[in-house]
Amino acid sequence: MRIFLVGMMGSGKTTLGRQLAQWLNYAFVDLDEHIVQQQGQSIAQIFEQQGQEYFRKLERQALEELVQKYERVVISTGGGAPCFFDNIYFINLHGESFFLDVPVEELVQRLLTQGQEERPLLAGKNIAELKSYLTETLTYRRQFYERAKHTISENSLSPESILSLLNL
């Protein structure tokens, strides 16, 4: 079984994904880290040099490649990955998807302590701009995130909650 975690940056996809993969003895792949390794450039460099559209194509290619490579894997997608090229449909076709639904206020707090400057869409924003950006972005992306097969709210983000939804 392939498990995909989707949601906004800072929602805990990587942290929860690593824990879940360890519990299940599955491989774990952070989609952004995978792309960075393949390209030999940071996400910020890819955005700056080739643009967001190029990066979104890399995400789709990476999803296709990982689905071919792994049967038992937990994949933490980038925040925007489900929102382009019908990726959420592709994800649902090839595994179980979970939307990690975390409120904007919590995302702001997490991102302020997790290297906001490393994220090209957030770099240079003050707290008010960050909150505004996250609110606007989540409002738009929610239509894609909510197509995930399961939704997990902030107060139940744990490997156990995912395993119970999968009846494991």
Image (cartoon, rainbow, N blue to C red):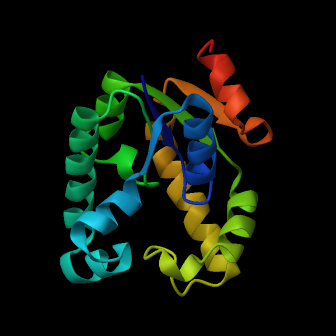
Where is residue 46 drawn, in percent x and y? 27, 75
**Is residue 80 shown above or below 36?**
above
Q: 70 or 120: which is nearer to us?
A: 70
Q: 146 or 2: which is nearer to us?
A: 2
Where is residue 164 drawn, in percent x and y? 68, 18
Left-right relation of 22 to 2 = right
Where is residue 61 drawn, in percent x and y? 19, 49
Q: Residue at x 50, y 43 (%)?
A: 6
Q: Residue at x 64, y 42 (%)?
A: 101
Picture quadrant of residue 66: top left
Left-right relation of 113 to 1 = right
**Quadrant housing the N terminus:** top left
Q: 166 or 108: which is nearer to us?
A: 166
Where is residue 11 drawn, in percent x and y? 63, 52
Q: 14 or 81: which is nearer to us?
A: 14
**Quadrant housing the C terminus:** top right
Left-right relation of 154 to 69 = right
Picture quadrant of residue 57: bottom left
